[in-house]
Image (cartoon, rainbow, N blue to C red):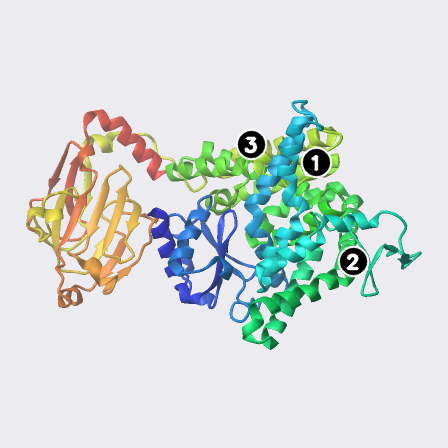
Amino acid sequence: MKHKELAKEILELVGGKKNVNSVFHCITRLRFKLKDEAKAKTEELKNLDGVVTVMKSGGQYQVVIGNHVPEVYKEVAAIGGFSSNQSETDEEEGRDKGNLMSRFIDLISGIFTPILGVLVAAGMIKGFTALFVALGWINNTGGTYQILNATGDALFYFLPVILGYTAMKKFGGTPFLGIVIGSALVYPNLSTLTVGEPLYTLFAGTLFESPVFIEFLGIPVILMTYSSSVIPIILASFFAAKVERGFAKVVPSVVKAFLVPTLTLLVVVPLTFILIGPIATWAANFVGQGTIWVYDLSPIIAGLFLGAFWQVFVIFGLHWGLVPVAFNNLATQGYDPILAMIFAASFAQTGAVLGVWLKTRNQKLKTLSAPAFISAIFGVTEPAIYGITLPKKKPFIISCIAAGIGGGLIGFFGTKLHVMGGLGVFGFPSFIHPEEGMNTAFWGFLGAILLATILGFVLTYFFGGVNKDEAPLEKNDSTAKQGVTINSPLKGQIVPLSEVPDQVFASEAMGKGIAILPTEGRVVAPVSGTITTLFKTKHAIGLTSDEGVDILVHVGIDTVQLDGKHFAAHIKQGDRVNAGDLLVEFQIEKIKEAGYEVVTPIIITNHSNFASIEGTTVKAVNANDPLIKIKVPEEKHAEASENIADVRA
């Protein structure tokens, strides 16, 4: 139910389902493509309980949720009626019109995001299989190894099949056509045709020299290895989607269901083997060798740069631009240095969050830091970045510095990624060399990770300015002993709670308190504390005082039915307020004309925590006049004093 309510609010605040061209999700984010981003209420979305932050990047409106994004996405899809086939494929209406970089990022994320979960799973299995062999727990000739290796390796070997599905879906074609095209590329019988003498050789004496073993209708076919490849199937799918749409326009409807896919496959598959595949493979090899050449110029400088700026790339979604390069390196070179050098970034962030967690005096920040730290250990750093370090600024900068140092050290040791594996600590086995095992490069990698974590923690703890804006108070339990005074949030006439025309309030089912018949439409803060609840209808405000008193100010009876009409809020949920600050304004006469009572209960919802609650004996009050006196039990003096010091700080 919590996920369902959050999904409803998110969909409403992005402008409703009619404003959504498509939506899908990655590990932590809902990725919307909106018709008009101006209709989205970004600040209100950011303040939703359950939303970490909102980002706009790569032509996408990204709502960062965290670890529960799959559950929220399911509810968003169900409420909005978004089918799985709609996700990223609206050719006519939803096509991104952004700049070239935005379109490229959107393309890559749309193709790779749907398989991230299973990709991580397969990589983890491959990585841990290599670890078990290196530790001598299993041997690489036994049945256990063979089955584990097949389980982990299947996705990577048949990657063209899987990417055929996601790429065709992204380009607006029929996904199952992409599966067939990808399957043809890795069809096992074709690999046996390269045995023996070739018929002849094309481009002899050049970089593109290629033996020809078969022909198609007299046209030479250059057979290549397409297992684990990326670029050929993406280009083939792009072309296939165009061809399919072309045939769909001219083929009669009565035979379209089977004739369009037949003609599409007859055109695209041969063309892929004859032209698209070889050209894409040569291009992939060139990109792979070029990347390694740049890396070899100075692995240390490359590591320093990528490590330091990786988290910035992630914030703006630019990291997707390096994903196909890394995949391509694994396919063409058998390893990738790029994702190895950035691996220290998540651990530098982990160390920085730990520093904030142990250093901060702010209880709310301390509470948020614990789950963010745990998520970061497992490679999911968005809660740490957006919820903890980035708002504090210095801890985020420190984490980037620590990540740069870690990346430079990884470059120095020449560590390579040998399989696209898990995140965080689950990714360690991905760096074990498949033949050499845990070599110097692997141990150097672990040392760099440890150093980045320690630097992130130590520098944040001592120099991160965690408590810069959190001035501490001396511990003093005099407030607790003297009791707590709740001031009047309104000007008006006092009404006993028992006379309120609502049985829930009158019976004290919500808590003890008092009511006011307002003569002025202004609600001010009755205490210094935090806005813990602000209903979207603005008629009810929940506050927690610095001393730990929970207060509900409910303007009128059944005024929730007005859906915010005649109310104006000057604060938002989570705000820190001082006694007397203006919270909400409301139009008394308009509310009465609509047929609603304006009598306003002021309720102490956690009244059972206190020894006594005494309301004022006067008949009328002004805003900020003493209204309710609360006495704290003797045994709670110390606890209340801690609350005063911690919460105010």
The single residue placed furthest to the front in the displayed view is: 254
Using a 10 Å C-alpha cutoff, classify the residue at mark 2 as few (fewer than 14 neighbours), some (14 to 19) or many (20 or more): many
Residue farthest to the top, as pictured: 136
Q: Which residue is mark 1?
A: 409
In the figure, is residue 187 to the left or right of 561?
A: right
Secondary element at tag 3 = helix
Q: In which quadrant of the rendered view does residue 362 lie?
A: top left
Residue 208, visible in the rendered structure = yes
Which mark, by number, is residue 458? 3
Q: Is residue 548 left or right of residue 98?
A: left
* Image coordinates for residue 246, horizontal then vertical, percent: 63, 73
Image depth: mark 3 or mark 1 in front: 1
Question: So how many labels did they put on this image?
Answer: 3
Q: Is residue 507 left or right of residue 222?
A: left
Residue drawn at point x = 38 percent, y = 39 percent: 364
Question: Which sits in the foreground, 371 or 333?
Answer: 333
Spatial CA span between label 1 and label 2: 37 Å
The amino acid sitting under disc 3 is: Val
For residue 278, the mark is: 2
Inspect the image, locate mark 2, and give the three-letter code of the amino acid beneath it: Pro
Name the amino acid type tagged 1: Leu
Which numbered disc flags the more N-terminal residue, 1 or 2?
Answer: 2
- Distance from the alpha carbon under mark 2 to that under mark 3: 52 Å
- Vertical arrangement, residue 635 with respect to residue 470, above or below: above
